[in-house]
Image (cartoon, rainbow, N blue to C red):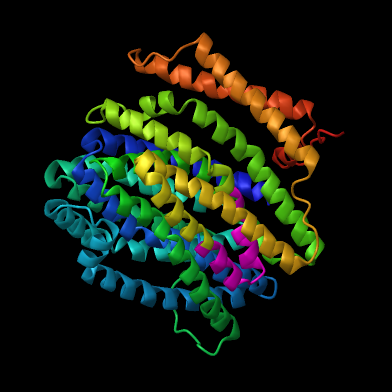
Amino acid sequence: MIRHAFMMMAGTLISRVLGLAREVLIAAFFGATKSMDAFNVAYTLSNLARQLLAEGALSAAFVPIFSKALTKSKQRALTLARMSMTVLLIVAFIVTGLGIFFAPSLVKIMSPGFDLAAHELAVGLTRLMFPFLIFISVEALTMGELNSLGSFFIPALSPAFSNLIFIITAPFFTAYYGVYGLALSVLCGGAAHFLTQWIWSFKLKAVLYPIRPDLSDPDLRKIMRLFLPYAAGLSLNQVNPVISRLLGSFLEEGSISVLNYSNRILQLPLGLFVIAISQAVLPQLSRAKDNEEFILTLRQALRFALFIVLPASVGLMEISRPFVHLIFVRGEFNSWAWDATSSCLALSMLGLPGMACSTVIMRALYALSMPREAFKVTAFSVISTVILSLIFIYPLRYNGLALAPSIAFTLSAFLGLYYVRKKIAKPLNIFVSKIFWNYLIALAVLDATAMLYKWIIPYVPDACIWTRIIWNIGAIAVSALSYAVITLTLRFEEWTFFRVLAPKGAPSCTG
């Protein structure tokens, strides 16, 4: 699992860096403006399938059953995947058509505070981008197949080609079509995302194409039976970004945009580490021979995720202002947008550990075929986000909309652990007292190091770009080094996981 996670991290790192470069390009062209708010609303609507399918219901329903079919016969598993592709394409085309038709109502629901001009712009962009659902849906199935076959690097790298195509085409399209050019670049990127993985499947002799589905097939019926409750739960989970955009539409102009910009930075560690680990762990959990193996795999996945995510969360909170300044402040991105994005980022980072645990735990619920419990965890997260957003929006404005999901995801992680523990009927022993206190010590050292670095070497916004780059790299390097030293001193067992990166035949760190 750890080896596969590292493969995904390597590919994801490239794609996330290019994704951040894409946001830098957008920010320079459009800043935090009304047209950018409209684009973000439209993109959220058309992008629902990424969370619903690529990182959600499809993986939850398809991967466990496909992985078990592989243990019997590869040809049987491929037939199952191809029948699933046919069903998925039918659903994707229907949803796309409905999305285009109901675009005005969807935009009204998501952004009731928009004026007429912003509403019409968001409707037009939504209709143009909705076919993106088709590309990303088929890509999700292909990714699930490749992951189950042990291929993780190319699926993780494929979004990089999507972002690269976007970066190449956006300047030309926006020059002629304005913000509508961004929508065209999204479609081009979605096609590249799918084609990269589909072409790679030829090499693995596992090409997906639609065939006539046998609706009496027990495995296909099980996938369809599991997909619907998982889809219901995960589509409910899509209410979370809708909440911030809905409530943000009533705040000052640019509020939706700054929440989106901070979320793009949040997605860097989230996608690089958390999604990589959760995607790698699902096939392993599905193939676990007994409860002991299942518990061990889940425990290692959660601890490894927190080992990486906790320092990233604390570190980015400390350097949120310099980091946002380096990434975004140029062109139309003004000082208000800088301040607002920085504060939203710091508050969002509070929830990164909770998001990490929640994502991995949801995979455990999928592997245990617990759609009802998965739905309850998602519903709890959404309800908590709504309540907390309404509580925080008045005193904190857009900052409240960043803080609410951070708390909600953390609480939902504990609820998910409760359901897994109840199903397994054995103690998970994920967090014991010694580990808790060791983490507190390690994070306190990291935080003190980052604060000392900022005090000794203040960040200078007016410095040249290379000086600012070096400052941010230095802050990250010094903080990471302090964390590495203290965790090695405290003998964190997570360091032993890195042995999987050693060449075969090399001696281990334990001799």
**Camera-nearest residue between 374 and 219:** 374
x then y, percent, for residue 453: 55, 15
Is residue 429 something one can see in this rendering?
A: yes
- 216 sits left or right of 164 in the view: right
Q: Is residue 355 above or below residue 344?
A: below
- 386 sits left or right of 308 in the view: left
Residue furthest to the bottom in view is 216
**Camera-nearest residue between 4 and 434:** 434
Is residue 359 something one can see in this rendering?
A: no
- Measuring 15% from the left and 45% from the top, which residue is drawn there? 178
The quarter of the image holding the C terminus is top right
Occupied quadrant, residue 288? bottom right
- Measuring 69% from the left and 29% from the top, which residue is drawn there? 442
Image: magenta residue range: 356-379
x then y, percent, for residue 424: 76, 66
x then y, percent, for residue 321: 41, 26
As for residue 374 lying within the magenta part, the answer is: yes
